[in-house]
Amino acid sequence: PAASAVVLAVGALVLFALSADLDRRLLLPLRRTRLRVFGHPLTGRGGARQVPVAASVELLENSLAWHTTSPVVRSALLDHWESDGWRILHYSGVHGEGVTARPVAVLFALDATAGRDTPGDPMIRVSYVDADTGAPVAAEELRAAPARRSLRLVE
C-alpha cells in the first residue's frame, strides 16, 4: 500500500509538471515574487526605469522622425547621452545637395524611459546642427514633417 501511494504521488507530480497550468499556477507567481523582491533586471539602481540604448535606437528607427530625416543621416549611432530625462542620440549627416551640401550633426532626443511597451507614439525631437559652426540648420524643414494618415478600411 505504501509503494502504490508513492507511485500515485509521483504520477500526480509528473502530470502536474507536464500540464499547461504549471506556468499559470506556480511559475508565474514565482516570477512575480522574484520581481518584487529583486526588482526588474532592466531597472537602474536609482529606481528609475532605465531603457537600453539599443532599445532607444530601435524605437527611433521605427519612428516617423527617423523616416523624415533618413535622407540626411549618413552614419550609424556615433554617441549618446542623457540630459534632463531625455536620451540624446547623435548621428552625422549631410544637408543639402551639390555645392550647397554641408556636414551636419543630426541629434534625436527621446524620452529616456520610452520603450517598445510605452503606449502611444514616442515623443522625438530632431535637430540639425552644422558640424563646422555649431549653428542650427533647416528648422523650417523639421516643422514640415508630414502628418500620419490612417489607412482606408477595405470591405
Image (cartoon, grey):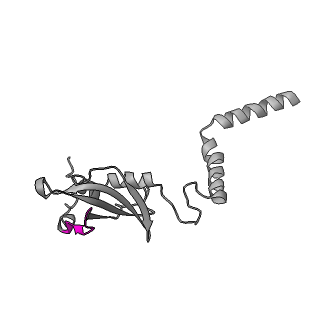
Please indicate whether residue 6 sits to the left or right of residue 144 in the image.
right
Q: Is residue 1 visible?
A: no
Residue at point 37%, 59% (across, down): 89
Overall secondary structure of the magenta section: loop
In terms of image quadrants, where is residue 129?
Answer: bottom left
- In this view, which residue lies farthest toward the bottom? 84
Residue at point 61%, 58% (across, down): 39
Q: Which x, y percent locates residue 150?
A: 23, 56
In terms of image quadrants, where is residue 148?
Answer: bottom left
Q: Nearer the viewer, residue 1 or 43?
A: 43
In terms of image quadrants, where is residue 132?
Answer: bottom left
Q: Nearer the viewer, residue 23 or 38?
A: 38
Residue at point 43%, 62% (across, down): 81
Above or below: residue 147 compared with residue 61: below
Stretch of the chain drawn in magenta: 131-139
The reply to whether the magenta stretch includes residue 136 is yes
- In this view, which residue lies farthest toward the right? 2
Q: Which x, y percent locates residue 73?
A: 26, 53
Specify the quadrant that holds the N terminus: top right
Residue at point 83%, 28% (across, down): 4
The reply to whether the magenta stretch includes residue 84 is no
Q: Is residue 101 visible?
A: yes
Above or below: residue 29 compared with residue 126: above
